[in-house]
Image (tube, rainbow, N blue to C red):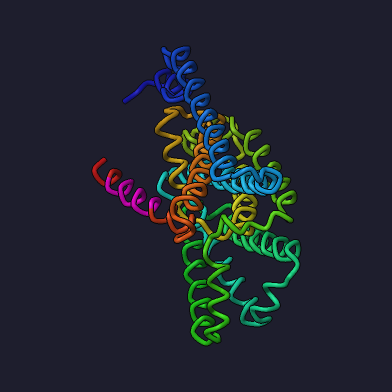
Amino acid sequence: MPTPDQATRVVQEPPASSLPPADAPRRLSRTAWVLLGLSALVLASVALFLTWGVDGHWDFALPRRLEQVAALAVVGTAIAVSTVVFQTLTHNRILTPSIMGFDALYALFATVLVFVLGSAAVETMNPWVMFSSTTVLLLVGATALYRWMLGDGSRGLYTLVLMGVIAGTLFGSVQGFLVRIMDPNEFDSLLDQLLPSFGDLDTSVLALAAALMVTGVVLAFRLAPTLDVLTLGRERAVTLGVDYRRTVTRLLMLVALLVAVATALVGPVTFLGLLVANLAYQVTRTHRHVVTMVAASLIAVVALVLGQALLQHVLHFNATLGSIINLVGGVYFILLILREARA
């Protein structure tokens, strides 16, 4: 039975994981080298993508490829940062924001548009209208879900995740029903929208997407110290003065914004965030979210740019980058589950 003095000392002493390690200078140096190495990989991959296969037509190829690189960077950064934040909130490294039903809601929205308006009207729709309506729909859906589930503070975060799974199943069922009664020709056009495409990015909305992404990322970095505290758990975070309910709600809305931007721009990419976030954890080996989010973003940009280069010049567009990422990410997801089971 601990004495009152011992109990007080246990409460006041900070947890071991929050204490600065004895080899902090060495780890800081290692972190710097890791980030420098990833930055060098980004520059090398971008240089390869910009110059590969250009036969003197620089005035035509370079501007188009620069736009593609910018779009890939926007998507990769948004997915990477949102996944790292979401995994911190759920204290689970095998979950991604897609578990909340974003992908299913996007698929349902695209299906309803084609079913009601027809594929011809959807294909000729103004890109700004399409991007804005998709982004707003995903944000409104996430806001309604979060406010409903966290409104009185009596429901936990895992209940929210469970409701997201149920909502995703419901959206998928409705979308499947509409697909079954849809005209086959319309369904062929719908498939082009449901499959993530990085080669046919509409760069006319890139400025808006980049502005929204930068806004979300800046907010995420401002909240990085709070994310470091949330890693310790809800009880310890509340003890250290964190307004848990308000903070979690703000961070979930931030995740919704970043996921909405990426999904509206290229479509659902389920496993990219899972892949880059866990690789970032392994190479950085730190609890500091500033470092982890930067590393995950750099890895995502490298993966997308190199993948798109290989897809264009080696596979000659005989596959899609999204399907390759989902295949690799799916295998990696299974390996993570097996490793967690052994642990």
Prevailing secondary structure class for the magenta stretch in the rendered image = helix
Picture quadrant of residue 290: top right
Name the residue rendered at 73%, 45% in the picture. 211
Residue shown at the point (47%, 70%) measured from the top left: 169
Quarter of the figure that contains the C terminus: top left
For this orientation, the residue located farthest to the front is: 56
The residue lying toward the viewer, choosing from 112 and 11, is: 112
Picture quarter with the N terminus: top left
| Residue 3 occupies quadrant | top left
Q: Nearer the viewer, residue 256 or 268?
A: 268
* Residue 159 is at least partly visible in this image: no
Residue 14 visible from this viewpoint: yes
* Camera-side residue of 128 and 167: 128
Percent of width and height locating residue 164: 51, 61
Q: Is residue 330 magenta?
A: yes
Residue 194 x %, y %: 54, 67
Residue 8 against residue 269 in the figure, above or below: above
The residue drawn where x is 64% and y is 53% is 261
Residue 334 in magenta stretch? yes
Q: How many marks?
A: 0
Is residue 342 placed above or below 27 in the rendered structure? below
Residue 144 as seen in the image, left or right of residue 156: right
Q: Which residue shows up at 65% across the image and 81% down it?
A: 118
Q: Is residue 279 left or right of residue 121?
A: left
Magenta range is: 328-338
**Whether residue 38 is situated above or below residue 336 in the rendered picture:** above
Where residue 256 appears, as percent x and y from the top left, is 61, 53
Q: Position of residue 324 (x, y in %)?
A: 43, 55
